[in-house]
Image (cartoon, grey):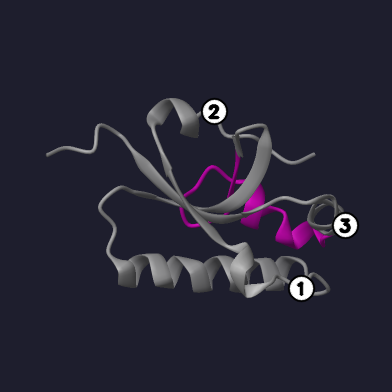
Amino acid sequence: MTSNGNLILVGTRVSNRLRDQLDASLPSMKPFFNEKDPAFLQVLRIDDEEYIGKLTTSGASLEMLGNMLLNVKSMLRMICPAFVLADDAIRVFALTPAMAGPLAVLR
């Protein structure tokens, strides 16, 4: 069975408070969420909401998803030290290629 380009996003909704913190982050932190590089955080629009997180291909192991969860939390903590991310704020989304593109960029 092939995934046909399906992706998994491990991330959180971009609230107004989080957006303000991302916009106010140090210039040295901007590449952590503005790059279209899988090593960095990606911003996507899902069902009229923006989400920030990490993407991987479908079929990822639970260990890999757990590592992505920790990575998303630590990167957001580094970018927005004053932002408190609740433990249950991180979600896992299964995305078809049409849902995953094009990537949005926070302004």
> In the rendered view of the protein, which quadrant contains the N terminus?
top left
Question: Where residue 101 sits in the image (x, y, percent)?
Answer: 50, 29
> In the rendered view of the protein, which quadrant contains the C terminus?
top right
Question: Where residue 8 sits in the image (x, y, percent)?
Answer: 40, 48
Residue drawn at (87%, 53%) of the image: 20
| Magenta span | 25-44
Residue drawn at (23%, 38%) of the image: 3
Label whose residue precedes the other's in the sequence (2 or 1):
1
Residue that mark 3 sits on: 24
Q: Which image quadrant for residue 27?
A: bottom right
Which label belongs to residue 102?
2
Label whose residue precedes the other's in the sequence (3 or 1):
3
* Residue type, label 2: Pro
4 and 40: which one is in front? Answer: 4
Is 81 covered by the magenta stretch?
no
* Residue type, label 3: Ala
* Residue type, label 1: Val
* Mark 1 element type: loop
Q: State left or right for residue 99 relative to residue 18.
A: left
The residues bearing labels 3 and 1 have C-alpha atoms spaced at a distance of 15 Å
Is 37 covered by the magenta stretch?
yes
Q: Which image quadrant for residue 79?
A: bottom right
Label whose residue precedes the other's in the sequence (3 or 2):
3
Which label belongs to residue 69?
none
Residue that mark 1 sits on: 84
* Mark 2 element type: loop
6 is higher (above) or lower (below) than 17: above
* Mark 3 element type: loop
Callout 3–callout 2 Cβ contact below 8 Å? no
* Crowdedness near tag 1: few (<14), some (14–19) or many (≥20) residues, C-alpha within 10 Å: few
Question: Where residue 95 sits in the image (x, y, percent)?
Answer: 42, 38
